Amino acid sequence: MLLFYDFHLLSGVDVFSVFSVRRANIRVLPEERVDHRVGVFDRFILCISPLLNIPRQCLCPPTNIFLAIVSQDLTRPFLRQGDDNQKVSIKNPFVWFLLPYSDFPYFRPMKKIQDNEVRWGILGVGNVCEVKSAPAMNLVPDSKVVAVMRRNEEKVKDYAKRHGVSKWYTDAQSLINDPEVNAIYIATPPNAHLELTKLAAESGKPVYVEKPMARTYAECLEMIAVCEAAGVPLYVAYYRRSLPHFVKMKELIDAGTIGEVRTLHINMKQELKPEVIVHLNHNWRVDPEIAGGGYFYDLASHQLDYLDFLLGPIEQARGFAANQAGAYAAEDIVAGSFRFENGIIGTGNWCFTTSKEAEIDDTVIYGSKGYIRYQTFGKGEFELVTQEKGREVFAFELPSHIQQHLINNITCDILGKDQAWSTGNSAARTNWVMDELTRKG
């Protein structure tokens, strides 16, 4: 018997369902005699069909087809993508085909636009658009920036001139209505995300929004709803899901390199003005009315979203939040614990008013055979310690424009060439965890 884990429903038709497999840990009983198949598979399509009603197209001979009979006692629930509260259990005999994604053309991602290139319009060309994101949109294939917007005319004209963008606007609706623009990047502070997402969705154009996705989980749900109603995709700029060292860590954990993951701890201490962010004249990052919270919402959101990508959704979270230093309105210290759907338990402690000497950015993931340690906001490297090989350090070069890999992935998703790694559904889960950890009372 084969046990498959971590499926996300991609689409379904009358006779069978199709799942996109991000990670499949496979255990095979010895009598199956297919030990060469045991391992971690990435980007596969899994077809599930009733035993006596196999779809004809599944009988085509794609390469490396993998067939197994699944017994009646497999009742593990599967989460539907975008519907975290509804589960499906498999209770009857099924034939399972596991085959490479590239060999199954029937259910590749659909194009989200009619064009063959993504022409971005950017709302809010502030600091994040100088290096991190917007320049990458002109570097990835089939993508370019064609229009930018900022309310300050002098600043938007200056940005457009320096970055070679021919069209600029001071009004969001005017940019959204530009017929040349076919995708919208919202790079404003979080308080504008919901309203601008509504405007972009109403225009029928894909939406890419900065992180955190919104000020609250409730706002996230509203953004998802308006995009689903309009039939447009919603992406969020959690780019660590695409960086090479974070991808490598996921490969190692999925392969069982540190054994079964038991627990993890996030430890982040920063002085009153952290060096890991850009400081502006008006620091909106610590204004709850604009940011939803303080530095916790700005920085911990990256940490928690990556853990969602690495280990799956968090199902329970409890925490304490306070403002100890009184330097601004938002919380400046958060401590909490959380449990993932797969049973892994984690803890975190964030304080943004320590001394410079106490600063630390450290996450450790402990398994039954070793552990992985990394900095979320540091270099492209991490430490792996195992019983078998001792201490190893993995180092990777990061892109000059840090969002480039994710923007390439999103561009490919819009054009029907790939599946997005960071969506409104995944990002909303991160907001939910933050809301739970900072819940007052």
Image: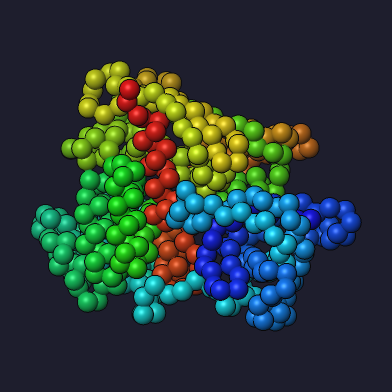
Q: How is the image coloured?
A: rainbow
Q: Is residue 93 above or below residue 252?
A: below
Residue at left offset 19%, top offset 73%: 178
Q: Residue 416: x and y, percent? A: 46, 73
Q: Residue 80: x and y, percent? A: 51, 56
Residue at left offset 28%, top offset 42%: 215
In the picture, measured across the screen, residue 300 lies left or right of residue 91, that is left
Q: Residue 271: x and y, percent? A: 35, 25
Front residue of 212 and 66 = 66
Residue at left offset 67%, top offset 81%: 56
Front residue of 73 and 9 = 73
Residue 171 seen in the current view: yes
Q: Is residue 204 above or below residue 290?
A: below
Front residue of 425 and 308 = 425
Q: Residue 159: x and y, percent? A: 20, 59
In the picture, measured across the screen, residue 172 lies left or right of residue 318, that is left
Which residue appears farthest toward the left when viewing the image?
153
Front residue of 203 and 413 = 203
Q: Is residue 426 above or below residue 161?
A: above
Q: Quadrant of the N terminus?
A: bottom right
Residue 363 seen in the current view: no
Q: Is residue 175 above or below residue 429?
A: below
In the picture, measured across the screen, residue 195 lies left or right of residue 88, that is left
State how many labels appear: 0
